[in-house]
Image (spheres, coloured by chain):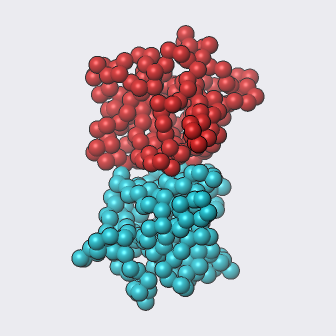
Chain colours: A red, B cyan
């Protein structure tokens, strides 16, 4: 749950990151930046700010803003009917992103797991993305990511987003943010 | 046909536009910027510079650079087998883009058609895109676009690109650029 003030503050902060990176939004996009706290009420630690540019039946493109050390928690995009699940490419535009996917675990990972949520992070194959670097995540693959100390901006290019079908490792997570 | 020098010059110029807009490329992307002259040998007038970030079976994302008044000539993306044809969203990142699609013709269009090629431009519904503005083109729809006086950068979010199947109105056009 977010308060109106927290929502407003997070949007203003996300705008600052996007402006710094030279990414221009329409007034409507700027006003409606999505702020996701994943139901945990710990936005600084577990959260994500999003601008969805387009989400058709076939294609989706978003800008993701992560505050310093903010984490998008572990999840996957399962098959739905004829759809094999969302395929997504993350391209770092600004800052550093530590991305974790299924595969051989890093010995000394750079991310710091949100305290008290350690048991909900189980994939540790590390991909470090600097500006201009990108990585494509196949459908139905566990992944999570965290920004470095300065925060990050990530462009996401994908098939259709159906957030409501995302599966999170953490049973306490709710994808839809409640604002009160 | 382009000479090696023209290719090299166009790449350097495109890099300048991308840098100015704050768009970071990897060294490999920067070195291999695609320069398309559409076989007409009039790159300044009819041409396009491209960075393809990703092109999977399902999703494609590119950065397009247009020099001042440079035109991407009229074409469409037809159905291929089970694929209804490429769907693309153009999002202006920098500069101005005059985009033309099927529909009611503009009385006083802002673009200037490449001289001698007027007969190959037949759709005149005008969409002006400033930074942050975007437009989605359905599959198999005739379209063409031109940058304003300062040039432009456009992000393209689409389904898979199969350039070799594109259909151009101008029979003189060849999508594959020959460099000699």
Residue at x-position 65% and y-position 78%: B178
Residue A120 sits in quarter: top right
Q: Position of residue B42 (x, y in %)?
A: 51, 82
Residue A103 sits in quarter: top right
Q: Position of residue A62 (x, y in %)?
A: 46, 43
**Left or right: A180 as drawn, with respect to A164:** left
Give the quadrant of the N terminus of chain A: top left
Most extreme residue toward the top is A116
Q: Vertically, is A99 above or below B76?
A: above
Residue at x-position 55% and y-position 26%: A167
Q: Position of residue B169 (x, y in %)?
A: 48, 80
Residue B165 sits in quarter: bottom right
| Count of marks placed on residues | 0
Which is nearer the eye, B159 or A145? B159
Which is nearer the eye, B131 or B16? B131
Q: Vertically, is A97 above or below B98?
A: above
Residue B7 appears in the figure = no
Residue at x-position 33% and y-position 58%: B130
Residue at x-position 68% and y-position 25%: A124
Which is nearer the eye, B158 or A2? B158
Most extreme residue toward the front is A81
Give the quadrant of the C terminus of chain A: top left
**Left or right: A80 as drawn, with respect to B45:** right
Which is nearer the eye, A87 or A132? A87
Q: Position of residue A142 (x, y in %)?
A: 63, 29
Q: Vertically, is A3 above or below B131?
A: above
Most extreme residue toward the left is B107
Residue A80 appears in the figure = yes
């Amino acid at each position: 749950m977010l308060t109106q003030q927290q929502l407003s503050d997070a949007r203003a902060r996300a705008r600052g990151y996007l402006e710094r990176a030279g990414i221009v939004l329409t007034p409507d996009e700027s006003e409606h930046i999505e702020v996701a706290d994943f139901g945990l009420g710990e936005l600084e630690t577990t959260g994500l700010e999003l601008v969805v540019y387009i989400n058709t039946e076939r294609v989706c493109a978003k800008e993701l803003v992560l505050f310093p050390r903010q984490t998008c928690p572990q999840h996957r995009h399962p098959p739905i009917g004829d759809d094999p699940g969302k395929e997504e490419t993350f391209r770092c535009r600004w800052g550093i992103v530590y991305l974790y996917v299924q595969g051989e675990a890093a010995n000394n990972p750079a991310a710091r797991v949100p305290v008290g949520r350690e048991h909900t992070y189980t994939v540790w194959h590390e991909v470090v993305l600097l500006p201009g670097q990108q990585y494509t995540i196949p459908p139905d693959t566990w992944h999570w990511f965290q920004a470095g100390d300065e925060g990050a901006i990530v462009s996401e290019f994908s098939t259709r987003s159906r957030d409501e079908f995302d599966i999170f490792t953490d049973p306490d997570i709710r994808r839809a943010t409640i604002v009160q």
